[in-house]
Image: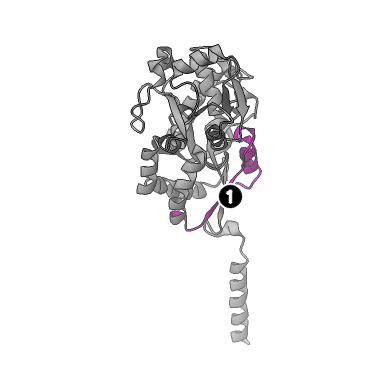
Amino acid sequence: MMRHMFKLAALAAALAAFAAPASAQPYPNQDIQGVIQWGAGGSTDVVVRAVTPHAEKVLGRSVIMTNRTGGVGAIAMKFVQSQKSDGYTLLMGAENPQLYKVMGLSDTDYTDSFTTINLLARGIPILVANKDAPFNTAKELEAYAKANPGKVKVGSTGPGGLPSVVMAMLGTQVKLDLTAVPYDGDGPALTALQGGAIDLMPAVLGAAIEHIKAGRMKPIAVIDTAANPALPNVKPIVADYPGFSKLLPWGPFFGIFVKKDTPKDVVDKLVQAFNQGAKHPDFVKLIDDRGFKMMNIAGAEADDFLKRWQANTSWIVFDAGIAKKSPAEFNIPKP
């Protein structure tokens, strides 16, 4: 009888362990969902899909990535906010949420609602044009646009997206009458540029460089204070508009985030995995080859970067007249 009771007890313990909730098991014990803010082929998509396979090897689980576009990234952000704070849903995004408040898109941002797992890299913006566009430099663009008001069609990813910020910055130097055409990310916009649906696109160098090298589009100017080693023959914007230098350097960034109240042990495992993933030689090579700047930061360093970026850019878009609310309303300091 005693032997029978011990067997039953052992069986009950085994069944209890098998039925234990996932939360009681070591993380991760199931596949993870990665929600990408922007469309396939864009800079955010390229960067996060390149680093994730290396992080998966550290985690021992797959990260199933999907693209949820719309609302300048807000659709993906709200979806992740609606999920549990258990580390099984990652937001794979770009800089846009740090502008949501001043653009009137949301009352929250990364700083308020998310923990940074890794700020992977930042991008250098570049103005690119259809290969048959009747201009080859920023000054030629200016002359053509002034002679043909409203004729130049420029790709847009919505208010607060990279194209709107770059065009706002350009607008501080020269007034151009252009027609904005909306797209769900720079990937679809760059495809439209190649097909001739638009004439001009402010994009990230990393997303456009292969198209440039293949002759599918042409560079107009790098939005930086100096030429980029990846495209050394392309002039920086300051060569034509020296006043631009006071706004530079500026650029987008790409990272991995989880909800703010995700358990610390889960955050630590994710931080370790993506930190190691970002050091993989294949990822480092992609970052270098495409003209990105490696960051690979988390914790207080990432928090400080996010706050500085938000302050600088929020005031740029507000001073340019494209923000709906003043950064001062949200206690965002002016640089």
Vertical position of residue 139 compared to residue 116: above or below: above
Q: Position of residue 232 (x, y in %)?
A: 33, 28
Q: Is residue 316 located in the magenta-colored stretch of the structure?
A: no
Q: Position of residue 175 (x, y in %)?
A: 54, 12
Q: Position of residue 193 (x, y in %)?
A: 54, 32
**Magenta region: which residues?**
58-86
Residue at 64 percent across and 19 percent down: it is 324
Give, as a three-letter code, the residue at label 1.
Asp
Dot 1 alpha-carbon crowd within 10 angstroms: few under 14, some 14 to 19, many 20 or more: some
Is there any visible trace of residue 280 in the rendered image?
A: no
Side (left or right) of 23 relative to 227: right
**Figure quadrant of residue 1:** bottom right
Vertical position of residue 68 compared to residue 199: above or below: below
Residue at 45 percent across and 18 percent down: it is 138
Vertical position of residue 287 compared to residue 153: above or below: below
**Figure quadrant of residue 78:** top right
**Figure quadrant of residue 163:** top right
Side (left or right) of 26 relative to 4: left
Side (left or right) of 134 relative to 259: left
Residue at label 1?
86
Q: Which residue sits furthest bottom?
A: 1
**Along the line of sight, which residue is nearer the eye, 297 or 264?**
297
Label 1 residue SS:
loop
Q: Position of residue 280 (x, y in %)?
A: 37, 48
**Along the line of sight, which residue is nearer the eye, 122 or 237?**
237
Q: Is residue 62 located in the magenta-colored stretch of the structure?
A: yes
**Along the line of sight, which residue is nearer the eye, 323 or 331?**
323
Is there any visible trace of residue 161 in the rendered image?
A: yes
**Along the line of sight, which residue is nearer the eye, 301 or 94?**
94
